[in-house]
Amino acid sequence: MTAIQDTQVLRHSRILSVGVHRPRRSVPNSEIAGRTGLDPDWIERRSGIRSRRYAGPEETLPAMATAAAEKALAAAGIGADQLGTVIVATITSMEQMPAVAVEVAHRLGAARAAAFDVSAACAGFCHAVALASDLVRLGRSEYVLVIGAERMTDILDHQDRDTAFLFADGAGAVVVGPSDEPGVGPVVWRADGTRNAALKMTAPWHDGTGLRPDDRPAITMSGWKVYRWATEELVPAATRMLELAGVTADQLDAFIPHQANMLITDHVVGELGLTERTAVARDIVTSGNSSAASIPLAMEELLSSGRAPSGGLALLIGFGAGLVYAGQVVRLP
């Protein structure tokens, strides 16, 4: 029998750069309070959020993703024609097909690249980084562009007191390429379908007969159920990510979790025993929860503010609807 030839791991991979697009409009808690009746101070105590970014009509999903990608490519010194693959992590495309990544690749001029989307909600970026790393390590692609991009406001019920204050828009991109030293650790990921109802859409786009609901489907969430699951699952998962990478918590220069809720972040920080040596991403304060975009946005904020060093070790971990999580240790660009 003829064996299929496969490729051995040829090299290491790392994140070479990061670029972001933050929507121009900043929405304070007072505006959310005006339409939901929630107290602005309660919103901040409950989530850590003071304001969040909302995209304007011209800041479409492909436009934001492309803007972030252009910055990441420029920072890496990589031309779009050098890209082998473009991956967009998103759950907010209003078109089932084609993939957002195809449009982004076209806008960038990445004519030779494969392009596809990843749908893993708020864990999508870390899923995509894992795929990108393997593509580079196996020699399938020289450079891979990974983008987390969301317009969560398109699937938000702006009067819903459980979700209206949390979600936001934005895009962040990284370029993953070859490296002489390991720069992306092994991924740890899991899907727990028993918790499906904790965070989902209110209805499908249609019921299978082609009939569509009177009201547009929107995101619905049991915050308490998500919080309980996250505080139970994320610490063991993060510990495993560190173990597989051969890194201890006290060696981390940065901790960049999905910006879901400051209470969840604080819990994981405490359980891992992170000290002041480790910069903790808290971009949620002014950016809100932008799902798959939140980790690259938070990474850029830590680096641009000087709170985390270029080349430092960072633990990334995303989690969200499914319920799912994914994460890995990386070298910062």
Image (spheres, rainbow, N blue to C red):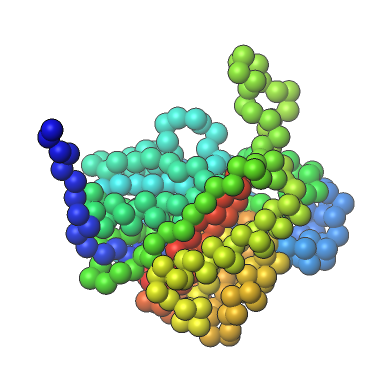
Q: Is residue 309 visible?
A: yes
Residue 217 screen position, x and y as percent: 68, 32
Q: In front here: 40 or 130?
A: 130
The answer to whether 235 appears left or right of 198 in the picture is left
Q: Residue furthest top?
A: 209
Q: Is residue 55 visible?
A: no
Residue lying at 63% horizontally and 52% vertically, measured from the top left: 168
Residue lying at 53% horizontally and 85% vertically, measured from the top left: 277
Residue lying at 32% horizontally and 65% vertically, measured from the top left: 14
Residue lying at 47% horizontally and 66% vertically, measured from the top left: 241
Say above or below: 175 vs 120: below
Q: Quadrant of residue 310?
A: bottom left
Residue 19 screen position, x and y as percent: 42, 61
Q: In front here: 283 or 189?
A: 189
Disc tally is 0
Residue 313 screen position, x and y as percent: 42, 75
Say above or below: 110 vs 212: below
Q: In front here: 203 or 82?
A: 203
The answer to whether 233 appears left or right of 251 in the picture is right
The answer to whether 333 appears left or right of 201 in the picture is left
Residue 329 screen position, x and y as percent: 43, 68
Locate the C terminus and report the quarter of the image it occupies: bottom left
Q: Residue furthest left?
A: 2
Locate the N terminus and report the quarter of the image it occupies: top left
Q: Quadrant of residue 137?
A: bottom left
Q: Quadrant of residue 26?
A: bottom right
